[in-house]
Amino acid sequence: MTHDVKEIFGSGGASPAPPAPAALAAKVRTLAPSMTRSMQRVAEAVAADPAGCAALTVTGLAELTGTSEATVVRTARLLGYPGYRDLRLALAGLAAQQQSGRAPAITTDIAVDDPIADVVAKLAYDEQQTLADTAAGLDTVQLAAAVTALAGARRTDVYGVGASGLVAQDLTQKLLRIGLMAHAHSDPHLAVTNAVQLRSGDVAIAITHSGTTGDVIEPLRVAFEHGATTVAVTGRPDSPVTQYADHVLTTSTARESELRPAAMSSRTGQLLVVDCLFVGVAQRTYDAAAPALSASYEALAHRHRATRKGP
Amino acid sequence: MTHDVKEIFGSGGASPAPPAPAALAAKVRTLAPSMTRSMQRVAEAVAADPAGCAALTVTGLAELTGTSEATVVRTARLLGYPGYRDLRLALAGLAAQQQSGRAPAITTDIAVDDPIADVVAKLAYDEQQTLADTAAGLDTVQLAAAVTALAGARRTDVYGVGASGLVAQDLTQKLLRIGLMAHAHSDPHLAVTNAVQLRSGDVAIAITHSGTTGDVIEPLRVAFEHGATTVAVTGRPDSPVTQYADHVLTTSTARESELRPAAMSSRTGQLLVVDCLFVGVAQRTYDAAAPALSASYEALAHRHRATRKGP
DNA sequence: GCCCGGGACGAAAATATCTTTCATTTCGTG
DNA sequence: CACGAAATGAAAGATATTTTCGTCCCGGGC
């Protein structure tokens, strides 16, 4: 299977993704790193005060951010809207949602001297936010396509290193439980070696938050070139890894701080995606999956002691 | 120019009434009687399908209702907005609110025939719930004690098998990053073998949702009996594992269903606890942790490709 | 029955707003 | 230090919105 040259702008097809309603804040955070300085200023202003910005015209927002109309429009496009007009509409929607109780609550970063109770609250809140954002920003078409590919795969390889390696293993464990042939690779050499074996009908999944981890991109590229269906789970939909991905599943990340770097918090969103993949596949292959799930549960029963404490 | 349509009702002032956010439907009903035929058609269309109308331009809405642009604008004015543009913004807000209001319908279990979008929503919701419950139920005194023990530990062993094994590894990875001597064990034999080495001042952490996993209880018991400080992260605060735990950290679990067994969903709460432990320790050992975090980040930099996708 | 005033209504001009184009500037690179 | 590519903004071009103004319709008085 050949793949045509990707267009310079548009980052992998602009139109198929419909604009987001409440996923805007997430989208801003997701795409901000790939934005130019001026665009970031615009995106920032928009994320900081949706209601205020919704009241502004292109010119107004351009002046507020010290940029030009063209830049504002460009930012709107990057965020997935046809133009500023539509971004503005989405902004109004977001403002209304925030108004009606679904407050985004501007939590502060975790500080060194925060009491432990605050740490718990902030972490829980951040992770909830990540889940909500990831869910809102997930492209269900891509997800469905990935599920279909998985459900019919001869075998599935999952690549991930570091924290993402654990996510890869989580996915693998789950898929194995419902009878799929899945394997997680964290050794780059072995991963590439195995990727060569893949062919059409097989699936390769790369998990990397930054989308730039060479150790993960390489096996995915090999799998891609050997005709396997490739999936990328990444926080950066325009990162290198997506070059070799038939389907891109985007995760969202919470604000990062010194005590909680992005590489660590990305896990939450990735796991949600993994769960979605798993449940999706389990649905499609229900007749086979249900008994397999029960069987693996039964097999573990004897490893557990009586429920009650004490002798 | 001297008198506009607006004077029909009291409110003699110019425009003291700010546009309505969600009160739009009510306003339409209130003002409908005082409207002309064409205006009523416009108002009706707007009230019937806010989302649809928000997507239309003046001309579009005029055509849809079989009227003219001027009439549409007049209707917008009558409803209290400066012009159609603002009505449209309010419409978008209303649509967004209605959209989000429909959300709580996801309280049911995941069914085999749920569309993929519902699966995403339900999973995200469940996991958010788990986070909230876990955070609410976490005993901060126990947590603080565990953190203190970790921060001063000579070495730390973490036990977990299956899905919990990944959580154990996650914790280990994090602790290693800030300079602690931590090791995750998923092999029960090796775990026990190593547990024998522990003594007072060391920490052993067992992670098991059911609290009945013998392979994890056993090493914790050995560690406990050798004088190590022991911590249990479990969903069952009265389960056997807590017998040998100095500190018990309780996680909450979402409703389980056939497609989403407890053993799989417990992960979310466990990871929150793990993050809390990590951040807590990082706070206590900040002077050592901060440089260590930066260092591990730098060390990985060369493993990443250039951020931009391009060829 | 016919004429007249007053408001409803829409066509089109006028204006505001958004989008595109293109020349300039900026920045990284060899 | 020059080169080229990307970023940026000014202004032209395209749309959308608002205003203007004339027509049409309705009901009442002569």
Image (cartoon, coloured by chain):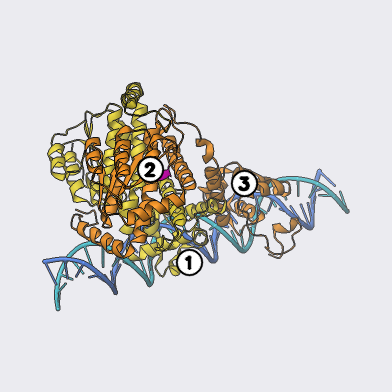
Chain colours: A yellow, B orange, C blue, D cyan
Same chain under badges 2 and 3? The reply is yes
| Residue B51 magenta-highlighted | no
| Residue B249 magenta-highlighted | yes
Against B114, residue B173 (above or below) is below
Against B257, residue A129 (above or below) is below
For residue B299, side relative to residue B267 (left or right): left
Q: Which residue shows up at 37% across the image and 50% down it?
A: B275
Chain letter behind tag 3: B
The earlier-in-sequence mark between 2 and 3 is: 3
Residue extent of the magenta highlight: B245-250
**Mark 2, residue position:** B245
Q: Position of residue A163 (x, y in %)?
A: 27, 48
Q: Position of residue A83 (x, y in %)?
A: 42, 55
**Mark 1, residue position:** A60
Amino acid type at circle 3 is Val
Viewer-nearest residue: B29 or A133: A133
Q: Which disc, if any, is residue B42?
A: 3
Amino acid type at circle 1 is Gly
Q: Which residue shows up at 66% across the image and 45% down it?
A: B40
Which of labels 1 and 3 is toward the front? 1
Chain letter behind tag 2: B
Whether residue A252 is visible to the viewer of this picture, yes or no, is no
